[in-house]
Amino acid sequence: MPSTGRYSTTTSLHSLMARACRVPIYDYAQHNRSGKTREVSPNRIVVVDGILVLYDQALRARFDLKIFVDTAADIRLIRRLQRDVAERGSNARLGD
């Protein structure tokens, strides 16, 4: 899986199966991790999402159920813009 710096999704997922772990909080305004974390507790059901979550074979093997939603590029762009304006304070200006 592509490097994500010090944080490892695979390591955290393995940890989460046994104990609570700290996960990074993403800063959408800065387009980077904020440096803050939040605690996620172990649970019978854990939802893991992301564009590369099914890339890593070792990580994929840990999932009981895998769902991939394939959506047309134009629909993805429209949804992303709408979400970013409504939830993340984006001004939706392209090319700046």
Image (cartoon, rainbow, N blue to C red):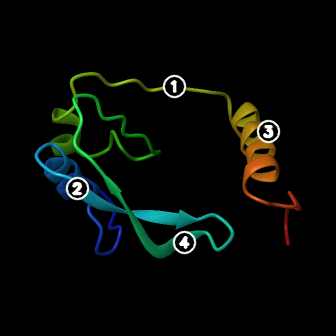
Of mark 1 and mark 4, the one earlier in the sequence is 4
Q: Mark 2: which amino acid? A: Ser
Residue 55: percent from the left, percent from the top? 32, 44
Disc 3: which residue:
78
Disc 4: which residue:
32
Task: Report helix, strand or loop for mark 4.
Answer: strand
Q: Mark 3: which amino acid? A: Ile
61 horizontally vs 67: left or right: left
Task: Report helix, strand or loop for mark 3.
Answer: helix
Using the image, determine if residue 52 lies above or below residue 25.
above
In three-dimensional space, the C-alpha distance between marks 2 and 1, rounded to whole angstroms, equals 24 Å
Q: Quadrant of residue 89?
A: bottom right
In three-dimensional space, the C-alpha distance between marks 2 and 3, rounded to whole angstroms, equals 32 Å
Disc 1: which residue:
69
In three-dimensional space, the C-alpha distance between marks 1 and 3, rounded to whole angstroms, equals 16 Å
Badge 2 density bin: few <14, some 14–19, many ≥20, Cα 10 Å: some
Q: Depth check: give the residue in front, 65 or 71.
A: 65
In three-dimensional space, the C-alpha distance between marks 2 and 4, rounded to whole angstroms, equals 19 Å
Task: For the residues labelled 2 and 1, say whether their Cβ atoms are less than 8 Å apart.
Answer: no
Badge 3 density bin: few <14, some 14–19, many ≥20, Cα 10 Å: few
90 horizontally vs 46: left or right: right
Task: For the residues labelled 1 and 4, say whether their Cβ atoms are less than 8 Å apart.
Answer: no
Q: Which residue is at a point 64% across and 74% down the rendered structure image?
A: 30
Disc 2: which residue:
12
Q: Mark 4: which amino acid? A: Asn
Q: Which mark is in front, 2 or 3?
A: 2
Using the image, determine if residue 38 lies above or below residue 55.
below
